[in-house]
Amino acid sequence: MTHTVSHLAQAIVNAHAALALGASKTSKLFEPPALIHQGPTAIKDEASTEVYQAAHQACLALDFDEADAQLIARAWQAQTQRTGQFDTDQWPTEPEDFGLRPRTDTEVFAPCPQKLGLYAVLPNAAWVGRMARAGVPTVQLRFKSDDAQTITQEVRAAVEAVRGTEALLFINDHWQAAIEAGAYGVHLGQEDLDSLSEADLGAVRSAGLRLGISSHGYAEMLRAAHHGPSYIAMGAVFATTLKRMATPPQGLARLQVYSRLLRHYPTVAIGGIDLDRLGAVLACGVGSVGVVRALVAADQPEAAANALLARMEQLGPPAY
């Protein structure tokens, strides 16, 4: 490779500036002055370290955290070795370059539809029943309580609330109550995943429940994929006031590359999505859109659900 690492890093930044969380910071990051366009460069084995260094440097400049920057840089290195050229325009999105491999049937959770459609995250069983009866195809009970008996009762009530509807019910966090009540599936955040043992996850799998896992970037996506979940949620796409997020909003450009990487998984985009943003989110290639405030804060929640469902039907599947 004849160009310096800094030149190549700047070429990556120029080609993928939309992925930055603070775009104004990425115009002039390296010296000497940036290349406008680098494109593909023939690669030899001894230059692969420079590929890693350039990609890592660029990813940090594009506001990826250290863990994600390392993963992307390794994937770019793998992509370069696989194709025989280093192309600064080609953001890595092939699962094999990130080390994702097909898992055996005994290692994965029960499947769910590739496209879960509108996915409502709701605070209690009454809301679950209300949105299920309104025709929302996928609902999640996100019920907060420190009392085990109250949790058990609410989960059972949610399972009863969707009975007679076509809605698929996921239970956030409370996996034992979900198994006992016969829910369709369980949803876990990364922090919930930390608290479960392999035996706990095995119990969910053996019970035939589906498993959804939240993610907020590459490291968490790959960690989620390692467990063979039924779906992977990606967010927050936009700013949300519902919960304090450890990571900033990911934005549409990142959602698109995340979706391409996880195209063999059912995916859910969530975080600040409403009717006006729905089309742009679906265009990123996700199979499902998670909403919270768009329903629970609406003056007429059923009407809001119908509007979202109608818009999704109108927009149809993404172009790729």
Image (spheres, helix red, strand yellow):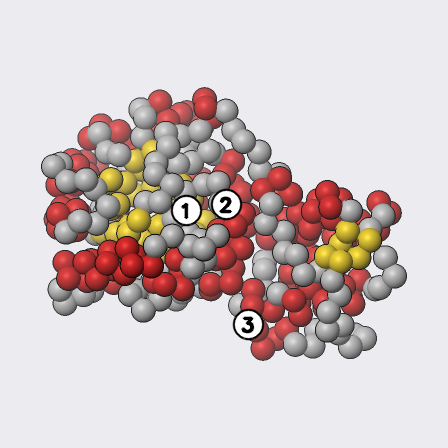
Q: Earlier in the sequence, mark 1 or mark 3?
A: 3
Give the x, y percent position of residue 61. 65, 66
Mark 2: few/some/many CA within 10 Å (<14, 14-19, 20+) = many
Q: Is residue 29 above or below residue 149?
A: below
Q: Earlier in the sequence, mark 2 or mark 3?
A: 3
Q: Is residue 171 above or below residue 179?
A: below
Reading the image, the residue beneath label 2 is 262
| Observer-nearest of 7 and 188 | 7
- Judge from the rendering whether residue 280 lies leftward or rightward of residue 256; answer left or right: left
Circle 2: residue type? Leu
| Observer-nearest of 286 and 109 | 286
Circle 1: residue type? Thr
Circles 2 and 1: CB atoms closer than 8 Å: yes
Quadrant the N terminus occupies: bottom right
Reading the image, the residue beneath label 1 is 267
| Residue at image location 23% in from the left, 58% down from the top | 310
Distance, label 2 to label 3, CA atoms, is 25 Å
Q: Earlier in the sequence, mark 2 or mark 1?
A: 2
| Observer-nearest of 290 and 182 | 290
Circle 3: residue type? Gly
Reading the image, the residue beneath label 3 is 22
- Viewer-nearest of labels 2 and 3? 2
Q: Secondary structure at mark 1?
A: strand
Mark 1: few/some/many CA within 10 Å (<14, 14-19, 20+) = many
Give the x, y percent position of residue 299. 14, 67
